[in-house]
Amino acid sequence: MSVATARVVGLLACQQTPFLRELDTHVLSCSDTPDSEGLYYVELADTVIFPEGGGQPSDTGNISGVPVKHARRDGLRAIHYVPASIPAGTSVRVEVDFKRRLDHMQQHSGQHLLSAVLRKYWGLETVSWNLGATVSHVELRAPKELVLLQGALDAIESKCNDMIFEALPISTNIIEQAAATCPSTVPDDYVGGVIRHVEIGVAGAAIDRNACCGTHLASTAQMQVLKLAGVDRIRGGNMRLFFYVGARVREYAEASLVRDKRLAGLLSCPPETQGEAVERLIKQGKASLKSLKSLRVQLAPLVAQDLRNQLVAQGKIQRQSTVYHCEDGDGPFSSSIGSELARLMAGSNAEWLTVVASGPKADGGPLVVVGNDEASIIDAVERLTLLLGTCKGGLSHGTWRGKAANFVRLAKLNLSAQSSTLGSSDMI
């Protein structure tokens, strides 16, 4: 591929004129065959499609109608990944998805402003950042004892929005790349190009000046608004501060209004009192759960007694057996039934076996197999596995405890001693 007739990354039309939406240019080269994903590699003389870099994702768009899936930097060259071959020498019109471009510019320029405010007024350095699909964040180097309370977050957000309102100019200064001026953040394979410094503010009084290859707005006013979205701690004591800028703030507000409206209907109260309503529901839920657990504790011995009566009523057969399934039960409930049944059957001379299952048929749940013969218990688990799929658990002191993924075919279980395997009709 010829580099001499191509604009180098750093001087591309998308970087020089980031609001340019389309450009007439020509193809310098195209790979002979597609890659494993069916994409060809196309280099243009110039482009309005930004190749990913500086934390900013690639633009998308099209080259004379052929979709550009993404673009990447290769040394000084911008390579476009397209699903069709475009011969070298072809005159083309390249267009960028400007909605995506503007979103990326708002988030990227917003990150520069946010990091500058954090550094200048709060002494917090940004060590990295991420432009996410819905929300972005900066990673800050912060002492472990530092906690950014809501008051501090409000102050940071307010300062950023004050500077957005001031419509501070955003400019880019370009110098030739040289070892003496090359920042450490420049990739090792980028040699012989230019260094771009993005400044926010008037000359001589800029609040921020950073080397950056991304596309940026012309004024902080074009950010429209910045909204912080919380903070969390990560490795090494650093923290991540999440944020939205521009159109993403409107989208977040719209989604929040939709949620508020839905919750207002579900909770029968306005957004202002939804928090209290949810707290009441949680409190009621905990009380109901406590009551349910108490009832299960009282119910388990009664169920065990009933199962014991069913076993005894079977008389002197080779193996007495029962199956009990409670869709509203849980693990402790099943274990309590199994333990109580084992106590009630302790004096029995007959071989007996019981399966206790808790949980919805479709979702499965806790499973207990209890009896007085370990070989029979293991045989029962094997039969359950054939019916229900893998049953994970273990045998200890005469009881197997585990889980099943579902109980849909539990009613087909045959525990009789005469049937050591399942018939073909039971496997359907």
Image (cartoon, rainbow, N blue to C red):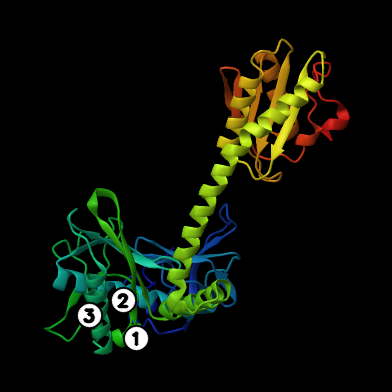
Q: Are marks 3 and 1 in contact (CB under 8 Å)?
A: no
Q: Are marks 2 and 1 in contact (CB under 8 Å)?
A: yes
Q: Which residue is denoted by mark 1 in the rendering?
A: 222
Residue 240 visible, this angle: yes
Q: Is residue 272 above or below residue 374?
A: below
Count of numbered tags: 3
Tell me which corner region of the image, top left, top right, bottom left or bottom right, holds residue 67: bottom right
Amino acid type, residue under disc 3 in the picture? Lys
* Residue depth check, mark 3 versus mark 1: number of the one nearer the observer: 3
Q: Is residue 334 left or right of residue 251?
A: right
Amino acid type, residue under disc 2 in the picture? Ser
Q: Is residue 377 left or right of residue 265?
A: right
Q: Secondary structure at mark 1?
A: helix
Q: Is residue 352 left or right of residue 171?
A: right
Q: Which residue is denoted by mark 3 in the rendering?
A: 159
Mark 3 vs mark 1, CA separation in Å = 16 Å
Q: Is residue 158 above or below residue 315?
A: below
Residue positioned 57% across, 78% down in the render: 64
Q: Secondary structure at mark 2?
A: helix
Mark 2 vs mark 1, CA separation in Å = 9 Å
Q: Is residue 291 above or below residue 321?
A: below
